[in-house]
């Protein structure tokens, strides 16, 4: 169908996701999430181990070296959205190629 | 909802990883067989959108926050198979780049949020739609109901894993009550965000919503088939 308008939709959606990650994520609640809170209240929080990649440059949704906390979160969000989008497009693009390859085979058999 | 390393013992974590790997293998196979041309980029967008919205923790009770899990949202937009892959991709990016969700707990997190959350949530969506009139607003209602229940189901899945392989020695009944109670509240937020997003996409591009394919006018389906098929 109208491929152009699908592209437009994808670009629009990506801008919304980037906007949410950059502008809204820094305002998000910093309280522990449901599971974290339950683990604290019920007394098994201390069994949690440090994350193996806790020293990574984006660990805990912040960019290493960016002092401003809000900016650090927002930039980490943008990087995360772009990584997820890029890998997702690649992955689902490959799956679509798989399907395109399979279709003529199925027609032959 | 992201389980860190250390909450669940290695045996149950490994078993969950095997189940998750099997589920995702099926999802990849099914997606490879059925993914439509226009749905491929949409699936990439859905993954990116879920990543962004998972960062938006909202307060649910004193000192507790929650965020979208996104399983039902992804499944309603791109189908349960591609949807489960979207959530798995988000969990992988979070665990590998953002130190969120333990590496040894990845199988558990995929099981709870992609297999139970997206695939299981989609089963609830289909069942709910079955008892409602066929219309776009009812697609939104069914998405909200399924979104709410998917979070509760994911919290029960965690409880089962904790009961089988939890490392701490604490009261299981208290963990069950706290998990389900807290996540029922988070589920309300999940339902609202899912309903808003699904209705926004339905308003702009209803043809892109996998869970509403049966509502597309028959004439359009007929004209689409030859163009999309070969």
Image (cartoon, coloured by chain):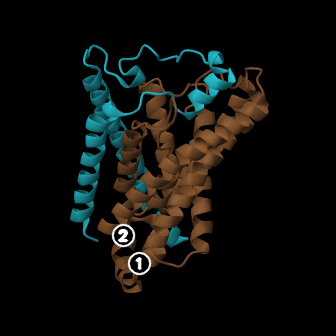
Chain colours: A cyan, B brown
Other-residue count near label 2 (Cα within 10 Å), few / some / many at <14 / 14–19 / ≥20: some
Look at the picture and state if B117 lies above or below B51: below
Tag count in the figure? 2
Look at the picture and state if B3 lies above or below A6: above
Q: Quadrant of the N terminus of chain B?
A: top right
Residue B135 position within the rendered picture, expressed as x and y whole percent measured from the top left = 46, 77
Q: Earlier in the sequence, mark 1 or mark 2?
A: 2
**According to the image, label 2 marks what residue?**
B206
B183 or A58: nearer the viewer: B183
A69 or A79: nearer the viewer: A69
Residue B217 position within the rendered picture, expressed as x and y whole percent measured from the top left = 39, 82
Q: Could you say whether the residue bearing mark 2 is in a helix, strand or loop?
A: helix
Q: Residue at x 60, y 67 (%)?
A: B128
B215 or B172: nearer the viewer: B172
Res. A56 visible in picture = yes
**According to the image, label 1 marks what residue?**
B216
- State the image quarter where residue B127 is shown: bottom right
Q: Residue at x 59, y 42 (%)?
A: B183
Q: Residue at x 62, y 20 (%)?
A: A45
Q: Quadrant of the C terminus of chain B?
A: bottom left
Q: Residue furthest front?
A: B62
Look at the picture and state if B29 lies above or below A65: below
Residue B88 position within the rendered picture, expressed as x and y whole percent measured from the top left = 51, 41
Other-residue count near label 1 (Cα within 10 Å), few / some / many at <14 / 14–19 / ≥20: few
Marks 1 and 2 in Cβ contact (< 8 Å): yes
Chain of the residue under the numbered disc 1 shown in the image = B
Q: Is residue B158 rendered to the left or right of residue B173?
A: left
Look at the picture and state if A3 lies above or below B181: below
């Amino acid at each position: 169908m109208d491929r152009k308008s699908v592209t437009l939709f994808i670009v629009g959606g990506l801008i919304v996701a980037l906007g949410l990650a950059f502008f809204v994520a820094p305002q998000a609640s910093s309280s522990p999430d449901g599971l974290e809170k339950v683990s604290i209240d019920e007394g098994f929080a201390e069994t949690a181990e440090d994350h193996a990649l806790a020293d990574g440059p984006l660990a805990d949704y912040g960019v290493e070296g960016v002092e401003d906390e809000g900016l650090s979160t927002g930039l980490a969000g943008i990087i995360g959205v772009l990584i997820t989008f890029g890998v997702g497009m690649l992955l689902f693009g490959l799956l679509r190629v798989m399907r395109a390859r399979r279709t003529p085979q199925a027609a032959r058999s | 909802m992201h389980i860190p390393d250390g909450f669940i013992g290695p045996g149950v974590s490994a078993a969950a990883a095997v189940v998750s790997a099997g589920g995702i293998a099926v999802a990849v196979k099914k997606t490879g067989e059925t993914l439509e041309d226009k749905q491929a980029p949409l699936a990439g967008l859905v993954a990116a959108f879920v990543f962004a919205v998972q960062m938006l923790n909202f307060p649910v009770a004193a000192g507790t926050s929650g965020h979208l899990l996104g399983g039902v949202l992804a499944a309603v937009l791109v189908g349960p198979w591609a949807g489960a892959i979207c959530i798995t991709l988000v969990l992988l990016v979070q665990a590998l780049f953002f130190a969120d969700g333990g590496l040894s707990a990845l199988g558990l997190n995929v099981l709870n949020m992609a297999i139970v959350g997206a695939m299981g949530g989609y089963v609830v969506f289909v069942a709910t739609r079955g008892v409602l009139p066929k219309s776009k607003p009812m697609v939104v209602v069914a998405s909200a109901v399924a979104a709410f229940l998917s979070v509760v189901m994911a919290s029960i899945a965690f409880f089962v894993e904790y009961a089988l392989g939890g490392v701490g020695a604490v009261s299981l009944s208290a963990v069950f009550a706290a998990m389900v109670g807290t996540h029922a509240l988070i589920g309300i937020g999940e339902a609202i965000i899912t309903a808003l997003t699904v209705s926004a996409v339905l308003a702009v591009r209803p043809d892109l919503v996998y869970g509403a394919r049966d509502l597309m006018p028959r004439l359009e389906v007929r004209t689409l088939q030859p163009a999309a098929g070969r």
